[in-house]
Amino acid sequence: MKHKVTTTVNGRKHEHEVEPRLLLVHYLRDELGLTGTHIGCDTSQCGACTIHVDGKAVKSCTMFAVQADGKSLTTIEGMAKDGELHPIQQAFWDEHGLQCGYCTPGFIMAAAYLLGQNPNPTEDEIRKGLEGNLCRCTGYVNIVKAVQTAAKTMSTSPARKATVAAGGN
Amino acid sequence: MAVSQLVGAKIHRREDPRLITGHGHYIDDFTRQGAAHAAFVRSPFAHARIKSIDVTDASKAPGVAGVYTARDFKGQLAGTHPAAPAFVADKKYIPERFPIAEKEACYQGEIVAAVLAETKGQAADAANLIQVVYEELPAVMDLEKAMASGSPKVHEGAADNISWDMTYTGPDVSEAAFKEADVVVKERILQNRLAPVPMEPRGVLAEFETYDKKLTIWMSSQNPHFIRLFVSGAMGLKESQVRVISPDVGGGFGSKISPYPEDYLVPALSRLAERPVKWIETRTESLQNATHGRGQFYDVEVAAKKDGTLLGMRMTQFLDVGAYVGTFSAFQACACLMAGGAYKWKGISARTIGILTNRVPTDPYRGAGRPEATHLVERMVDLVARELKIDPVEIRKKNFIQPQEFPYTQNFGLVVDSGEYARALDVALKLAGYDDLRKRQADLRKQGRYLGIGLSTWIELCGFGPSAATAPATGGIALVESAQVRVTPTGSVIVYTGTHSHGQGHETTFPQIVADQLGVPYESVELRHGDTAEGTAFGYGTYGSRSLAVGGVAISKAVGKVIDKGKKLAAHMLEAAEEDVVYEHGAFHVKGSPDKSKAFGEVAFASYGMNLPEGMEQGLEAVAYFDPPNLVWPFGTHIAVVEVDAETGSAKLEKYIAVDDCGNIINPMIVDGQIHGGIVQGVAQALYEEVVYDDETGQLKTGTLLDYMLPSANEIPPLSLDHTITPSPTNDLGVKGIGEAGTIAASAAVINAVCDALSPLGIKHVDMPASPDRLWKMMKEARQ
């Protein structure tokens, strides 16, 4: 039996009939075609599928699509606005915070939530705050740098700060 | 090569805008109209006879389009899994391997049946309904027991479990050195089995066009041309009928070099079902079936003089091949050839034994053979230093190959092209504050705390490779590299390389080289790779830190050919003799008359026109292959500082210093990124990761990322990097590889630090991973 699910994803409203067992990450990828959210494990360790659900960072493989009914979601595709990169995206680019790029969307979403909660984290707080995400390429060095750089940019750009605090985009 | 602005500059990656916005194209992002989804039934046993397979229920399940067993593929696929002889000349036993098991499954995860369905959920559901009756057989797990004559066999009916047993240099070679010795140090050194774990698992989407008899394969591969070669052969197709596209690839680390059973089965399923077929690996499938790395132990003894002069080494590599021989498995035996490290030896005796077990095959994993060699020699040198009460720095400096001795022919006849080992060591010592660290260590020891400092003065050989070495090693195909450079009428430059990037940033770095050499805007140069339908006839892929040192040089050569043709045409346009025309800053001009000049774009446009010199064909493009005269030899020094908690045995990496020398640097940002990632993979081997199978049943106990511990940002300290630059004399760019360096160096530095930390307890050697439980037990025993 299928269930009706209504979501707002990156500001757009969607209505779908889905199987109750459909994971949120598969809903995003297969139903909505938002393939920027990646799958890297079966057990919610890697964080590649991290998105925001009503402003909170969530591993979208840990939720069923039906649980997202009525909720507002932000995925990596919703982070850049009008062709302008989000400061965290820009910082990942500037600091070489990615290599193969597969884990990157999850890291950017996790970092956006982290900086929303704690706009000026210490290096230790960044490392702890991102421990739910795994990267195999960068050794985390430049990911941490990217988050530090983004924190600086965002602290001098009040508009961005406000939107991030409100929901990560 | 001209001094330039781009080579050596931190240019931000072109790949990134699509990747940071979620617009990359990884394998699971592709689909084809009407595609069926494949799921595989895999043996739950490490070793079992397949008595029967009942597909009745699965065939009737919702959405099922077909259920297939080995029999169905008999007319579809021919031959056995390819296994290159690599560096082991005497390949004794290579078990036959068909991509799907028929009568006997030899590792947990081996495919026994396949299902096609309309959705991946339906395919997975139906796979669960297939009833396979197995008769469990003894699992061969222990390397030493597997070698004994009475051992059960990995494959029923086999004569033994030895895949190869090769003596590179016999005991006689080191006999004189051992006779001279004041001290002989012995150790058994384990190399824990590792899972490469690229964050993107593998996947294959195949479409066989029944009426055109053409096959297109999209897959996550480091090596699309080799896949085309292998799969076309197995399917009875010409290479020209097959196109392999490897799009954005989410990491490889060696695990996406060799062909896998699914790489054959998914295309064969597409031909059988007459529709596209897609399969995406789950993480558990990946941990269970993607080739593992390491999985070895070494028996080593080293002879030295009282003053610390190293004399001789005897070593035997015992390598867990797994249930079948991986395509490049025997390459791992190069650990023997590199066992001497950065030092001079009178004699080294080396032997490698490849032993089959009922585990998934091992194959190259980042560094492949060279991390093992570094770990072995760096551990042994520390053990000798400790025995003789010499500082680890001093013993290294005493035995290094000296700068004036290069090119240096080492014990196995390999010619080390260049090096300045003591300089890298000195830079690292300074960066680490070595003397202060030793003082701090002494202070902490008084407080009962265990701080250790570990050195790894590593070297490697990479840039595979010269045809004379690699063609015999692969069974015929020399691992040279190809490039094509095409200039369009308006002067855009499209560069095709046979290498493949899966995080290394080739789309950025290779155009840096081309734009500099041509003197054209960087933006006008585009790099393309990963599609066998484009570029040269054959490409060799990316592994063994070869892309720049072989592929980059091939590109540079092709650019040279373009410039040569441009000169001929420009001379004609300028009414000058060809030898009077020079090419500088993006323009051809007559020597001594800079005003008589034609810009690159003008010449490119003219090359497609009518006014060409007699006999010249239209167009401006060139193909080049580069067969390197030697391998390249990066080196460096890594220093790890580790504190082991006296109560819990937990080893905390406090500080990590790396000074690496990879010759000339194209893009320092990318080089540092490669080193960072490499180091953390080596640290992970030293402290965290290990593939664990049950010793008796062969059941994989680390089948998820819950059980297989990849470090997170929270386990890793900041890394301090520096470089020395000793250009390679082997190629015109003066470059060496850097992709594997960090991993090659790191495990030795960390374990040397752990052993140094625990030396007050009399602990000399610690195996990997140096996990809290292992160290706690060792410390407890040592204190008793």
Image (cartoon, grey):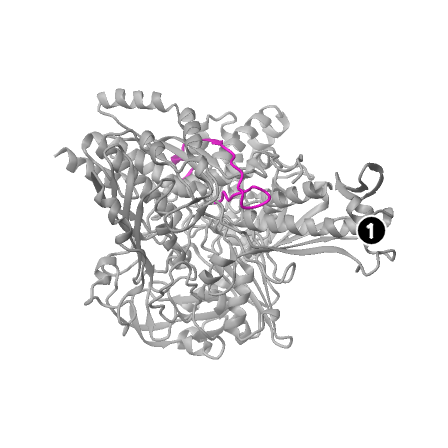
Residue at numbered disc 1: B605
- Given residues B61 and A149, the one toward you in this image is A149
Residue A102 position (above or below residue A97): below
Q: Which quarter of the figure has residue B151?
A: bottom left
The quadrant of the image that shows the N terminus of chain B is: top right
Mark 1, chain letter? B
Q: Residue at x 47, y 39 (%)?
A: B675
Residue B97 image offset from top left, x and y in percent: 39, 70
- Main SS, magenta region, reads loop
Q: Please report the residue visible at 27 percent of the width from the left and 32 percent of the height from the top.
A: B756
Q: Which amino acid, mark 1? A: Phe
**Magenta segment:** B712-739
Q: Residue furthest left?
A: B784
The image position of residue B265, as x and y in percent, is 48, 69
Q: Residue at x 82, y 51 (%)?
A: B605
Q: Nearer the viewer, residue B143 or B702?
A: B143
